Amino acid sequence: MLLKKFFLPDDFIEKYEFIDVEYMNMHNKKVIISDLDNTLISWDSKKDTKELNRWLKKMRRAGFDIIVVSNNTEERVQEFCRQLNLQYVAGAKKPLTLGFKKALRKMNRKPEEAIVLGDQVLTDVFGAKSLGVMSVLVKPISKTDAFKTRVNRFFEALIIKNLTRRKAFPKMKKLGYKLTHKKESSGGYIG
């Protein structure tokens, strides 16, 4: 089924902070390729947050790479990423895989070492799945969106409803959720 193949996230989380050292190690990942707007900060914000700064420092200290891949403009993405000393790819044209590939080259990483973190099924999840990268959908930070994103959200809601009705869409894991480390027969982990 095409919906599952391209639009079903590998995980669904409440907030980016759910991805921690334990999560990355459990999935054997080394790099987080993250969307910016409504994933790390509100789409209409120009300032980072204390929580985001703490999370980035913790993840970097543990040796994980983090790079922002955004469809937004160079000016918007550069201004934000410069504050946090983050590498980035702006104007990425997601869901095309070009921006993700560029990010992997910048970080000198392979697709199997990465997690794509984002708030949109039609751009972030679809792009990650097209490249064969683990996709983690995050609940959008803001309840509002830019106009072009509102159009995507309409179609995204139909996809999520369809996958949920088929009992395929993952239940959202909230902060405080305890990860389990039961090994699956395929060698992966059940989260």
Image (cartoon, grey):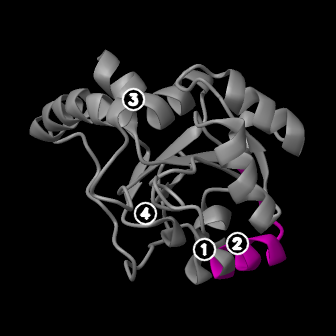
| Element type at mark 1 | helix
x and y percentages locating residue 67 in the rendered image: 74, 50
Horizontally, is 81 left or right of 166 in the view? right
What residue is disc 2 on?
Answer: 56
Horizontally, is 106 left or right of 177 in the view? right
| Element type at mark 2 | helix
Judged from this view, the residue extending furthest toward the left is 165
x and y percentages locating residue 171 in the rendered image: 26, 57
Horizontally, is 66 left or right of 109 in the view? left
Above or below — where is 55 with respect to 171?
below
**In this rendering, which labeled residue sits more in front, label 3 or label 4?**
3
x and y percentages locating residue 162 in the rendered image: 14, 31
Q: CA distance from mark 2 to mark 4?
A: 22 Å
Amino acid at pointer 4: Gly
Instruction: Say if mark 3 contacts mark 4, CB within 8 Å.
Output: no
| Element type at mark 4 | loop
Q: Which residues are magenta?
A: 54-68
Amino acid at pointer 3: Leu
In terms of sequence position, does the residue under pointer 3 or pointer 4 come before the other? 3
Amino acid at pointer 2: Leu
What residue is disc 1 on?
Answer: 52
Q: CA distance from mark 1 to mark 4?
A: 23 Å
Quick one: label 3, few (<14), some, or many (20+) residues within 10 Å? some
**Which sits in the foreground, 160 or 82?**
82
Q: Could you tell me how many numbered marks the image carries? A: 4
Dot label at residue 191: 4
Dot label at residue 122: 3
Q: CA distance from mark 3 to mark 4?
A: 24 Å
Above or below — where is 41 with respect to 50?
above
